[in-house]
Structure formats: C-alpha cells, structure tokens
Image (cartoon, coloured by chain):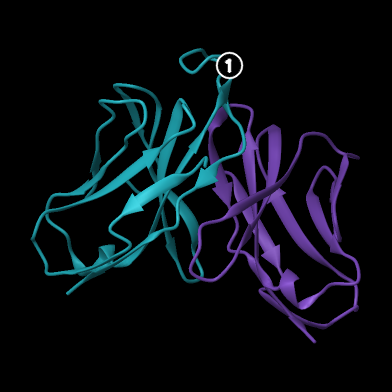
Amino acid sequence: EDQVTQSPEALRLQEGESSSLNCSYTVSGLRGLFWYRQDPGKGPEFLFTLYSAGEEKEKERLKATLTKKESFLHITAPKPEDSATYLCAVQAVGSARQLTFGSGTQLTVLP
Amino acid sequence: EAQVTQNPRYLITVTGKKLTVTCSQNMNHEYMSWYRQDPGLGLRQIYYSMNVEVTDKGDVPEGYKVSRKEKRNFPLILESPSPNQTSLYFCASSFVSGGPLSGRAAVDEQFFGPGTRLTVL
C-alpha cells in the first residue's frame, strides 16, 4: 500500500527565515510525486511534479527536490503570502490513475 | 477562464435525505475525480472517471455514487447520507497521458474545484 508522510505537521517561520518541508513516501514504483498548495477555504493548487530521483524544480521562492525515499520543498526567504498548507502526493507506476496524498504541512509565515 | 466549479459550496442536511453535489469543468479534461478531506487524514479519493461512461472506485467509495454521462460533468450522489459523511469535498479534473482507456494511462496535474462543505445532522 502506498504511503505518504509529511513533516512537520505545522511550521511557523519569521518572514525571511528559510526552511524545508519533508515528504517521505513508500510506493511500489514511483511514476510521479506532486506538490500542491492549499489556502484556507480553497481547493489545492498544483505546484510541481517530480519524476525521478535527483530532479529539482523551482518556482519563485519554492524549490522541490526528490530522492528515492523522500521529497523536500525548500522555501527561501518566505513571505507572509507563502502561508498555506502544502500537500504532497505520490503516483505509482502500477496505479497511475490515482494519487495518494499526505496530510499536509501547515506553514505560517509571520511578518 | 479555465476552472472546475462545484455546487453547492455549503450544505447542511439530515440523515437519509438524498443529495447531489454537482461538478463541472471547462477544460475538456478526460479525467475527473472526487475527494473528501478530513482533519488529520488528508485527501482521500472517493471515485474517479477516466472518460465518459467509465467510473472506478477510489479508496473510500462506500455510501457514494457517481455518474459520467457528459465529459464536463461528474456529479457526486449521496443516496442516504450519514453523519460520518460530514466532510469537505473536492472535485478535480485532469488531462490523461498515454490514452485514457489504455493500460499506460496516467493522470497529470489535477485542477481542483473550490470545495463543498457538507454537514449531515
């Protein structure tokens, strides 16, 4: 059974204080790992897809990386508008019609 | 504007009273899906559809029904709602790579609707 564990559950940062969110996964053959951002009261919004270990993708202050067991979402010099819940999801080669989501990390960036 | 819409956004109902939550997308996506989101449990898939007239169970299908008669619409039906179906529901859609009905079909980035908060008393 595919499993995704995100840590920490919640993270509070001061504006400009860089940090990383972790997504550990167990999957029988990874096709893709997805990162989404979810603002309160809204649906998740797609950020990145990573397909192979060593791959990195960047968008503004966010950079996602992937190893064979985990993915990191690095946030550099965050701003209050980066406050949101960040969700990680994996897609297995054998069941590429579905995603398994983690419970998310709730990030709060204080001004 | 490309979007996924859901209606209603909020619904309070009583046990046993049938209800339907509608979902519509305007991006010509083959794939549509329903999720429920509960605190500490993350997003769990209820049903998904790879194309018109093709639906499959997700991880938590009990107590739910879906239909896919048109490509753009994917309603979620609760025939006899119970309090344990109180949750936040999201519809999502996506293109499919590899051909929607092939053995190599794979879902790409999903676009989510705004959510429907359902309370069953």
Q: Is residue A40 left or right of residue A13?
A: left
Identify which amino acid the numbered label 1 is placed on. Answer: Arg
Picture layout, residue A5 above or below residue A31:
below
Task: Identify the residue shown where x is 36% and y is 40%.
Answer: B24
| The C terminus of chain A sits in image quarter | bottom right
Split into 4 quadrants, where in the image is the N terminus of chain A? top right
Q: Residue at x 28, y 58 (%)?
A: B8
Expressed as whole percent of the image width and height from the top left, the position of residue A56 reads: 88, 44
Residue situated furthest left in the rendering: B17
Q: Disc 1 on helix, strand or loop?
A: loop
Residue that appears at 86% across and 61% down: A61
In the figure, what tint was chain B given?
cyan
Q: The purple chain is which one?
A: A
Residue B43 sits above or below residue B48 on the image: below
**Percent position (x, y) of residue B74?**
31, 37
In this rendered view, identify the residue nearer to me: A91 or B93: B93
Would you name the residue on which mark 1 appears? Answer: B104
Tell me which corner region of the image, top left, top right, bottom left or bottom right, holds residue B14.
Answer: bottom left
Q: Which of B16 and A43 is in front in this view?
A: A43
Pinpoint residue B44: horizontal percent, then vertical percent.
45, 52
